[in-house]
Image: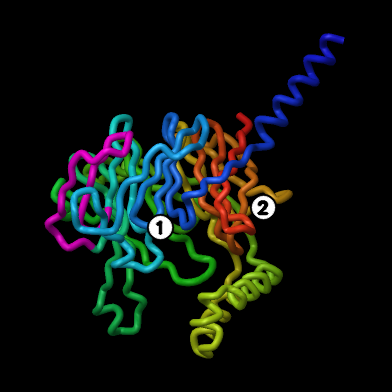
Amino acid sequence: MKKILFFIILLVFVAFVFAGEMVTLPEIFNPETLEVDGDDLFVTQETSVFIYSLEDYKLKKKFGREGQGPGDFKSFKWLLAGAKDIDITIFPETIFVGSYLKTSYFSRQGDFIKEKRLREVMMWVNIAPFGKGFAARGIKPERDEMKKGKPGLYYTFDILDAEGSKIKEICRYLFPSGVAKKIPQYHVTGNRLFISGRDGLVIDVYDEQGNLQKTIKKDYKKVEFTKEDKQRIIKWYQEDPFYRKYFVPNKRRWKLLRDDIEQAEYFPVFHIFLISDGKLFLQTYRIKEDKTEFLVFDLEGKFQKTLYLPLQYKDFTIPHLYTIANGKLYQLVENADENYMLHITGIEK
């Protein structure tokens, strides 16, 4: 009898932990970054940062606004439509905020400490502290290539000094165009810079001088871009307000978009990657029983396991904003009432 009672209690506990919980964040209407560190949850929205307690999910502090004064920020969207307004990096004692032409530091409580205006006119749309300066992802047009009819627009990954001047370009990748193209991205952890941009399941790891230290790779069978996928995404573009207004009525734009969809054969190997809890999580395009596949590696590149997590999607291929931390999946999902709900789901170890 005691054994039966024990297993009933265990099952109830597991169901509670892994079924998840939800809480409304009433201040949020357009989130761009979601981070969890220690006992706090951080959300960026436009040029503001919101700090919530993980104990009761109440707002502890909001700081930042559009402007030029101390503690104000100018959006990266000035450079690239679709970029995040600001970047944040959470440290044990401080919060770093990267914005257009400025780097800023705040306490973990959200109080302003200092800022520095960068000397060089930036073409970078992401920036994070790295070594004695910064790592940055930028955009670089090569006009000579464009004049010859080539794409000519690149994402570059650069090492910057403390003043924001470029020391070294590490690598560059053509700006992705098309529905089945990987977006190059990076993450900084400690004294290592992880960059994904090459085809396949490949992540390159660089040191503080921008020297290649390691390449993480794994054989992986791509997910086919099926006829049903193509029909679904065409329908989504036809119903999306932006594309319905600017693409569908324009015969040339709509033809280019449809041709790109029709010609796609496979999804990229993975959508994004993130680093958390000392692990590397790669989100693929494979879905099984309404759950999304994640491949988990240690930071030395050793494959550990495959997870399937209950991501919710805002359109055909892009999930609602999420992060993984403390053995949990956190995701901000907009409901039918246009309120953002924070979904918290335990991850099996």
Between 252 and 284, the residue placed more toward the observer is: 252
Mark 1 Cα within 10 Å, few/some/many (few <14, many 20+)? many
Residue 66 in the figure: left or right of residue 101: right
Identify residue for label 2.
287
Residue 167 visible in rendering: no
Question: Would you say residue 139 sits in the magenta stretch?
Answer: no
Residue 244 x/y as whole percent: 56, 80
The amino acid type found where label 1 is placed reads Pro
Of helix, strand and loop, which one carries label 2?
Answer: strand
Lower position in the chain sequence, tag 1 or tag 2:
1
Residue 180 x/y as whole percent: 53, 66
Identify residue for label 1.
184
The residue furthest top is 2
Residue 82 in the figure: left or right of residue 118: right
The amino acid type found where label 2 is placed reads Ile
The residue furthest bottom is 251
Residue 57 x/y as whole percent: 51, 37
Question: Would you say residue 101 sits in the magenta stretch?
Answer: yes
Residue 40 is labelled as: none
Residue 345 lies in quadrant: top right
Mark 2 Cα within 10 Å, few/some/many (few <14, many 20+)? some
Looking at the rendering, the stretch of residues picked out in magenta corresponds to 99-122
What count of labels does the image hold?
2
Q: Residue at x 46, y 54 (%)?
A: 31
